[in-house]
Structure formats: C-alpha cells, structure tokens
Image: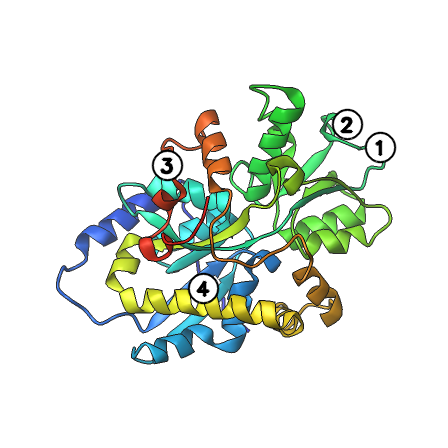
Amino acid sequence: MTKPFSIRRRTLLGSALLLAGGIAASMPQTAQAEATEVRFARNLGLGYLPLYVMQDKGLVESQARAAGLREVKASYTPLGNPTTITEATLSGNADFGAAGVPAFIIAWDKTKGNANLRGLAALNAQPAYLNTNRPEVKGLTDFTDKDRIVVPSVRASYQAIVLQIAAEKTFGPGQHAKLDPQTVSLAHPDGTAALLSGKTEITAHFTSPPFQDQQLRDPKIHKVLSSYDVLGGPASFSALWTSAAFHDANPKLTKAVLAALEDAVAQIKADPQEAARAYIRIENSKLGVEEVAAMIAHPEISYDLTPRGIGIFTDFMARIGSIRNRPADWRDLFFTDIHDRAGS
C-alpha cells in the first residue's frame, strides 16, 4: 500500500506560492543529476486510471531505466480534494499533481509568473453525473435551499465548474453561482456514503466513475444530468501537471513519466480487465473485475493524453472571474512535450 505523506496545510494558497517561488529562486543554476524519486499526488477514481496502472506495473521505473537514468522510485498518494493536491505540488510534498481540468486551470492561473505549474498531459475524457436521492428532482430548478450537493471541491473542482455552467444555462446570465451556497466539499467515497445513507442533509452528489455507477445501482438514486450534456459532448476530465522548475531540471525523467503514461493508456485499451484488476488492487476495492472493466470500456469514456475541450473551461472561467489569465490556446497551459497533438 502507498504510504501517505504529511501535508502542511496552508490557510492561504498564496503562502504556498511564496514558498514555491522561494524554492525556485534559490535553486542553483549549475547542472545537477536528475531526481531519483518522483512523487505523484492524485485524486480518486477511474479518471486517474493511468496513474493506477503506472503504480501497479512500475511503469515510471521501467521507462526511467530505458532512458538510462539511475534507479528511480515512484510513489503515489491518493488525495480526495483537488485544492490539497495543488498545495502538495506547491509545498514540495509532490512533484506531480493529478486532478480535474478546472482545478488544473486554476493552479496554472494562480502560479503564472512564479511557480509556473503547467500540464504534462490530459488523462482521459469521461462524463460526470449529478445524482440525487430525491425522486422529485428532475432538473436544477427542483433543488431547494435545504438541498446540499456534494462536489470534490467547492468552486474549484471539475464538478463544481460544470455545475456553474449548467446553472447559467438553466437560470440565465449572471446566475452561474446560484447553487454554490448549496455545494459542500467531500471526497467521492464520503459523498457516496452520505448520499446512499439518505440520513444526512446530502441529497445530491456530482461525482465520477466508479462512484456514480455504484450510486445508480441503488433504486433510490437517479441521474439529474451528465457533464457531457452541459459541455456539449466529450471533453478532458483530468490532467497531470508539474512545475516548470521540476520539468526543466529533470528533462529525461519528465519524458519517462510521459512515456509511462502512454504505456499505461495502451495497456488500458488493450486489456480493460487487467486495468480493472490494477485499480481494484490499489484501492482495495470490493467491486468486481467485470464491473470495473465495463466502466473502463464504456463508450462514453476514453483514455487519451490529448487535451480536449480545454477552451470551454478557460473561456467560461475567465468570463466569470475564476481565473485572471485567459489563455489564447490550450498549449499555453501545457508543456511543449505534447504541443504536436491535435488538442482543443
């Protein structure tokens, strides 16, 4: 099992930025050997399956050896909150962070000109479902002030931003934040348990596979909407990022990580069942292999490192003030390693 690291929580993201900027400024400019350890902080669920496969199969280690690097140790820490993942990468507790695309965009925006967090690759495209245990809720207009909607991180997660886009489409211009006061931050497993129990104030959960699928097995739960309905089709769900300092100081290791991601995606496509076993082993999940493999192979889900639909999020987030910097192109957010791809 992965050993958790200790995270020193920041009361303000700005303090983490100052620390990261100080670390970068104090780094010697002389050539150094590349790192022999690489640490990943990731969110939970099948949106991060390439990292589960990388961990289970030791793919970073094997790609590092193939690149002629010294023996490299890769470690993976699961965290259920994208803001915490960003803090981990800024505070030096993780080298790479993996979370939903909007959380990555916010991290890129806040660190532009200092720590300069940028994406190495997208991880997959998958729909996120807003599920509820209230039978009378058929759309967003049916929620009342008493309802509480779980998202991984309020106003920062993939689900939170998609809910804002949906709210604006439902309630009209300027109403994107109408449901924000009713959202609460919980990790996917905790939100799932609360929704299924029906004994808390939690009446809805905007989540992702496999949690949304687990919920819908209960006849008391039904889907209100899918993120694909809101976004107009598939778009990248998650991304992997690192700092410019780490990327530039470790060019071979960074390429080894990207190669490991490519290898993981190829293995997922070739053998969804073995990918399901990797996920189950690492999560100690009670889900069946066939059940998870069916989710992985679902026609609405694709594992692909090419960023897609990034502009949908950046345009919306810049317009409502969630980010200060509006990128001209998706490539502004990602390292040149994947600029040759046909992203959007």
Residue mark closest to the camera, 3 vs 1: 3
Q: Is residue 315 above or below residue 20?
A: above
Please report whichever mark, 4 or 2, sits nearer to the chain's N-terminal start: 4
Residue position for label 2: 142
Nearer the observer, 70 or 341: 341
Q: Amino acid at mark 3?
A: Pro
Which is more N-terminal, label 1 or label 3?
1
Assign a secondary structure to mark 4.
loop
In the image, taking residue 146 as reference, residue 227 lies left or right, namely: left
Disc 2 on helix, strand or loop?
helix
The residue located at (60%, 41%) in the rendering is 159
Residue bearing the label numbered 1: 136
CB-based contact (under 8 Å), mark 3 and mark 1: no
- Label 1 with label 2: CB-CB less than 8 Å: yes
Mark 3 or mark 2, which is nearer to you?
3
Report the mark closest to the observer, 1 or 4: 1
Q: Amino acid at mark 1?
A: Glu
> In this orientation, which residue lies closer to the viewer: 149 or 61?
61
Q: Which label is found at residue 327?
A: 3
Query: Which color mode does the image show?
Result: rainbow
CA gap, disc 1 and disc 4 = 43 Å
- Where residue 40 sits, quadrant-wise, is bottom left
Looking at marks 3 and 4 on the same chain, the residue that comes earlier in the sequence is marked by 4
Residue under numbered circle 4? 5
Picture coordinates of residue 208 (x, y %)? 65, 51
User: Is 110 placed above or below 19 here?
Assistant: above
Q: Is residue 45 visible?
A: no
Position of 331 with respect to 300 (left or right) is left
